[in-house]
Image: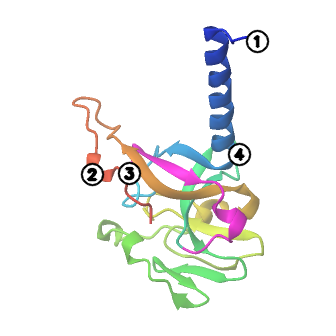
């Protein structure tokens, strides 16, 4: 006759299996991140919580305009999120606040500068390069071009520092206001583009 497992043992085994599965998924498939700064406004707001596809670049190379999460090159304990603007082998230049790739103007009007700052210029923020992007490296910029620590300030991003591609906002709360609690329901399920 088969011996039945105790109630406690059954639940303990189920809990261990669930934890191992969650750890596997978080490590290799999908991971959640919270947006702590305004460097990706208007695409991502402070308090957005996103899911990142960690398998995306196992099957294809990163592409221009992908929003990626990566280990910050100057401190790998910190994760950053930016948009890929320049690819390996390309020449990139920021000239008069406009981005040129291989001497062609990049259509990035959704991520441009604000007119408020038109009267003064700050290199390398407003004028940078031209630079040749080496193989295995990427040039990344925040969508909030005036308030983003990105490749203009710390250089190229190594491909092996990329964690994955941001793909969806699953939760959003205005963290700058604690009371009243402001949950941004309209952002739930929004695809990160």
Closer to viewer: mark 2 or mark 4? 2
Q: In this figure, which residue is indicated by the disc labeled 4?
A: 76
Q: Disc 2 to disc 4, how far (Cα)? A: 33 Å
Disc ID at residue 45: 3
At which x and y percent is residue 56? Answer: 63, 62
Residues 182 and 99: in front is 182
Q: Nearer the viewer, residue 123 or 77?
A: 77
Q: In this view, does 38 lie above or below 3?
A: below
Asked if the magenta segment contains residue 87, the reply would be no
Q: Which mark is residue 63?
A: none
**Cα separation between marks 2 and 3:** 12 Å
Query: Residue placed at 44% from the left, 83% from the top?
Result: 107
Q: Residues within 10 Å of mark 1 (few under 14, many from 20)?
A: few
What is the secondary structure assignment of the residue under circle 3? Answer: loop
Q: Mark 2 points at which residue?
A: 186
Given contact means CB atoms under 8 Å apart, are the residues at marks 4 and 1 in contact?
no
Task: Nearest to the eye among marks 3 and 1: give it.
Answer: 1
If you read the primary sequence from the N terminus, does the residue marked by circle 3 or circle 1 appear first?
1
Quadrant in the rendering for residue 54: bottom right
- Residue named by callout 1: 1
């Amino acid at each position: 006759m088969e011996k039945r497992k105790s109630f406690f043992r059954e639940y303990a085994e189920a809990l261990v299996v669930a934890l191992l599965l969650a750890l596997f998924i978080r490590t290799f498939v999908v991971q959640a991140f919270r947006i702590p700064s305004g460097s990706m406004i208007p695409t991502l707001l402070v308090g957005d919580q996103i899911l990142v596809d960690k398998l995306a670049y196992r099957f294809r190379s990163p592409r221009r305009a992908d929003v990626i999460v990566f280990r910050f090159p100057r401190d790998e304990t910190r994760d950053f999120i930016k948009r890929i603007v320049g690819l390996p082998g390309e020449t990139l230049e920021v000239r008069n606040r406009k981005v040129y790739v291989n001497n062609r103007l990049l259509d990035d009007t959704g991520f441009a500068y604000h007119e408020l700052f038109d009267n003064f210029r700050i290199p390398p923020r407003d004028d940078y390069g031209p630079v040749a992007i080496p193989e295995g490296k990427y040039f990344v910029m925040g969508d909030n071009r005036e308030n983003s620590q990105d490749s203009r300030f710390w250089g190229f991003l190594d491909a092996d520092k990329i964690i994955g591609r941001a793909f969806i906002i699953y939760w959003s709360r205005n963290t700058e206001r604690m009371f009243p609690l402001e949950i941004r329901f309209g952002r739930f399920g929004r695809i990160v583009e």
